[in-house]
Image (cartoon, grey):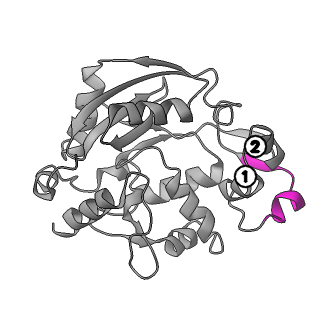
Amino acid sequence: MLLPIVYYRSMKIVNNPTNDIRFQIVLQRDKNARYSLREGSSVPDAALDSGFESLRRPYERSRLHLAMSPGQYARGGKGLALQYQIFESFLGLTLLCNSEAGIAALYLGDSRDALEHELQSEFHAARLEYSEDSVQRINVMDYLQGKRPERMITVHLLGTSFQQEVWAALASIPYGQSRTYSAVARSIGQPRSVRAVARACATNRVALLIPCHRVVGSDGTLRGYRWGKERKAALLAAESME
């Protein structure tokens, strides 16, 4: 269950510490759109994930530079060893998932079963193991409470280079502010890729640390949020009150 805004405000993220996140970038070059299609993505999804607004350009430009571990992301995390845990946070239940490289997922929800199902669906080929690692949990909770974590928080972003560019742009949005999808597209030098930016926000799997909740429609409406508009509204309201 979503906890009251006042509780979130008492745990606010100070000085926008998202700017201090170190991103784990794994570069894998010489991939193309057909690679994504062979792994089960639809033509529109493969195009948007790579930053194309139309279906023509992926075929005009066959070689894309994708930032992902070789085959892991496209094959459901094959070869990845992931540890996860579920705990209560100020936004309800939180699922924290770690790879050896860093935080691979931070989900929000109301049901343990639903959170585990989401993780298993997204990383269906990975080796998943439940963990009670209190050190990592405390480290993340300290960060979310505005404290400086004892250890650097590393986010293991698994996705195309376009998605990672969008997610890095999201992490630069200051606390208490928001950006439109078109503004984010312009900030990464892709002003015509608004739909692709929206999809990258929707596929962000690291809540709060990559603050996709700070992106709104051109008219100021909330639009969608992977973990529910109620949470998005609560987060934005709490941040704007500071």
Quarter-of-image position of residue 76? top right
**Residue 166 as seen in the image, left or right of residue 175:** right
Q: Crowdedness of circle 1 by 10 Å Cα count: few (<14), some, many (20+)?
A: many
In magenta stretch: residue 118: no
**Residue 150 in sight in this render:** no
| Residue linked to disc 1 | 46
Q: Nearer the viewer, residue 210 or 90?
A: 90
| x and y, in percent, of residue 196 in the image | 62, 63
Q: Is residue 86 above or below residue 196?
A: above
Amino acid type at mark 1: Ala
| x and y, in percent, of residue 144 in the image | 24, 44
The residues colored magenta run 55-65
The mark tally for this picture is: 2
Q: Nearer the viewer, residue 170 or 118?
A: 118
As helix, strand or loop, the secondary structure at mark 1 comes to: helix
Q: Earlier in the sequence, mark 2 or mark 1?
A: 2
What residue is drawn where x is 87% and y is 52%? 62
C-alpha span from label 2 to label 1: 6 Å
As helix, strand or loop, the secondary structure at mark 2 comes to: helix
Quarter-of-image position of residue 178? bottom left
Amino acid type at mark 2: Ser
| x and y, in percent, of residue 234 in the image | 24, 61
| Residue linked to disc 2 | 36
Q: Crowdedness of circle 2 by 10 Å Cα count: few (<14), some, many (20+)?
A: many
What residue is drawn where x is 80% and y is 49%? 33
What residue is drawn where x is 66% and y is 39%? 27
What residue is drawn where x is 41% and y is 55%? 171
Instruction: Single out the residue that lies furthest toward the bottom.
Output: 219
**Residue 148 as seen in the image, left or right of residue 162:** left
Q: Is residue 14 above or below residue 125?
A: below
| x and y, in percent, of residue 20 in the image | 36, 47
